[in-house]
Image: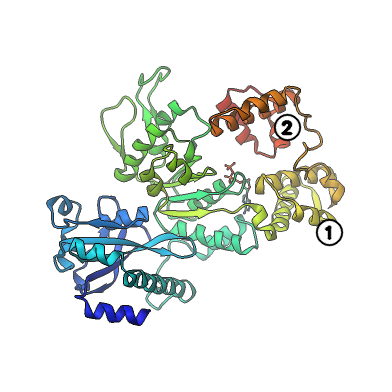
């Protein structure tokens, strides 16, 4: 097939072609190969605006055909020099080249020609074969870069050091292939300036990964500023992010700087981005594209140079389909994506994480728990951990306290902690009105709302059972106290810290 493609291309008038890849900082697209163009004339393309079709194509992961590349509109977006280098092509077609493993756009192929030629070519067999060849070559080049850095790269200072790699190795515990890849992804993300979207079930370590990316990035000396979009009333998020002038809203008795200003030079981490209210999503997109914003009640715009990391356990593509999340924002925040798999998909990490938690307990409590018995280890490996790493760490904490100072955690020490279907020992039995609640939830027309009602009911019951103690309620539910506090705030529940 490859030979026939080359044969076909040789007979046809050769289209001008250029291949572009983002630089390590994610700030510009650099030309890496060309055919029928003067390589030296191919311009670098700034990545700060989605107006440029090549940037749009890379960020959105979609092909983009510009039929009138020479119009003044596109000249404004910086297309002029590219068009000139592509033999003054009347139309340009940008196609994303993907990393096969993660299906993520990593480079862009730009073709110049007439709009009809490009449309015909785009739907031909030759074209799909050519794309396949490019993607294979790119994958080969990337693999070579990772395994044998070339002479020009050797000695070149990299944003992260061996010390950073060690730090990631120590903080992101795990010996599975998945954990190793996650550590490599964290380092790669730290070396780039692109926006990162971290996805995964609750408790897998998304916040942890975001914090680590910042800690080994060149921005580490500046602030890491987190905001949990699910833990704050939707109408307060804008003031929290952008800040507000005195009197901008009821209760604003003094002016306050927002988190965007606090993140200047550092990292802004938007956790649970799937819960960002729709009207605010447009404002966030503008902020990301222009790095400018206006505090509530102020006239002057401000700027902030922050790096964005977002996380969510919700299926954003599904929310996009349902019209609850803006598609353009989705593509903008996932210039890089990092998926953290559930613990049941990386069982090889369970025992090392348990040992890590025991060592931490010994350090903090001046205890001497020596480890896990073989039987206890086997029980842990067989468990599905719906609450993921958080559940495992909390469970080991409780088991360590049961050991009473020195000794092994045995199977009895895990008693009642590994139950999945029935409530764990020490947790309340289901409340008498559970069935009417379940019945009413089954009638719902909103799954999100039904889940929230159920979550609120479980937390309220658990707080009642533990006489309002958030600490004990959080432990019994396998979530950190901070998360429970956020949820109490969200649902308007009382409780004592
Ligand atoms: N690989 C790991 N090594 C050591 N600790 C980890 C690892 N992964 C997660 N943790 C720890 O597990 C706990 C839960 O992680 P984290 O809060 O980051 O999860 P999350 O996915 O952000 O959860 P949520 O969706 O509820 O926000 C944290 O205490 C975190 O430090």
Name the quadrant containing residue 248.
Answer: top left
**243 in relation to 303, above or below:** above
Q: How is the image coloured?
A: rainbow
- The quarter of the picture where residue 415 lies is top right
Image quadrant holding the C terminus, namely top right
Measuring from the top left, give residue 432's x and y in whole percent.
Answer: 76, 22
Which residue is most to the top? 250
Question: Would residue 304 be visible to someone looking at this image?
Answer: no
At horizontal 43% and vertical 37% (from top left) the residue drawn is 324
Q: Which is more toward the observer, 378 or 301?
A: 378
Q: Indicate left or right for 99 with 17 as reference.
A: right
- Res. 284 image quadrant: top left
Secondary element at image label 2: helix
Helix, strand or loop for disc 1: helix
- The x and y percentages for residue 313 are 55, 44
* Residue 472 disc label: 2
Compared to residue 330, the image places residue 153 above or below, namely below
Q: Please report the residue visible at 36 percent of the width from the left and 72 percent of the height from the top.
A: 129
Q: Which residue is mark 1?
A: 374
Q: Earlier in the sequence, mark 1 or mark 2?
A: 1
Quick check: 33 left or right of 208?
A: left
């Amino acid at each position: 097939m490859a030979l026939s493609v080359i044969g076909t291309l040789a007979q046809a008038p050769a289209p001008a072609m250029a291949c572009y890849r983002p630089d390590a900082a994610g700030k510009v697209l650099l030309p890496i190969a060309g055919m029928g163009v003067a390589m030296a004339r191919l311009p670098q393309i700034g990545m700060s605006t989605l107006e440029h079709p090549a940037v749009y194509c890379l960020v959105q992961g979609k092909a983009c055909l510009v039929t009138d590349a020479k119009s003044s509109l596109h000249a404004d977006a910086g297309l002029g020099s590219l068009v000139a280098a592509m033999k003054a092509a009347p139309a340009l077609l940008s196609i994303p080249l993907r990393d096969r493993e993660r299906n993520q756009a990593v480079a862009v192929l730009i073709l110049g020609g007439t709009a009809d030629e490009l449309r015909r070519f785009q739907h031909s067999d030759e074209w799909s074969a050519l794309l396949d060849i490019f993607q294979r070559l790119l994958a080969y080049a990337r693999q070579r870069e990772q395994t044998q850095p070339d002479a020009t790269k050797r000695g070149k200072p990299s944003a992260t050091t061996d010390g950073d790699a060690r730090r990631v190795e120590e903080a992101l515990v795990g010996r599975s292939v998945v954990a190793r890849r996650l550590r490599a992804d964290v380092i790669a993300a730290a070396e780039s300036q692109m926006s990162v979207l971290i996805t995964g079930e609750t408790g897998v370590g998304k916040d942890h990964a975001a914090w680590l990316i910042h800690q080994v990035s060149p921005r580490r000396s500046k602030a890491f500023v987190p905001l949990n979009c699910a833990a704050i009333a939707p109408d307060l998020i804008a003031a929290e992010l952008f800040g507000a002038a005195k009197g901008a809203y009821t209760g604003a008795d003094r002016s306050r700087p927002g988190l965007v200003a606090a993140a200047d030079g550092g990292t802004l981490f938007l956790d649970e981005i799937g819960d960002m209210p729709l009207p605010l999503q447009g404002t966030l997109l503008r902020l990301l594209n222009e790095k400018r914003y206006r505090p509530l009640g102020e006239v002057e715009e401000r700027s902030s140079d922050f790096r964005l990391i977002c996380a969510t356990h919700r299926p954003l593509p599904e929310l996009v389909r349902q019209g609850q999340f803006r598609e353009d924002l989705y593509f903008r925040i996932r210039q890089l994506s990092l998926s953290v798999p559930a613990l049941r998909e990386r069982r090889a990490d369970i025992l090392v994480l348990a040992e890590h938690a025991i060592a931490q307990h010994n350090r903090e409590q001046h205890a001497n728990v020596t480890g896990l018995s073989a039987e206890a280890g086997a029980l842990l490996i067989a468990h599905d951990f719906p609450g993921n790493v958080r559940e495992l760490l909390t469970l080991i904490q409780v088991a360590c306290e049961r050991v009473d100072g020195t000794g092994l955690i045995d199977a009895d020490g895990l008693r009642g902690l590994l139950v999945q279907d029935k409530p764990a020992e020490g947790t309340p039995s289901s409340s008498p009105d559970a069935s009417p609640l379940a019945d009413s939830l089954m009638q719902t027309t909103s799954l999100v709302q039904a889940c929230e009602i159920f979550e609120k009911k479980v937390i309220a019951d658990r707080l009642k059972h533990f006489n309002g103690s958030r600490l004990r309620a959080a432990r019994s539910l396998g979530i950190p106290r901070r998360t429970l506090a956020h949820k109490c705030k969200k649902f308007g529940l009382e409780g004592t810290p």
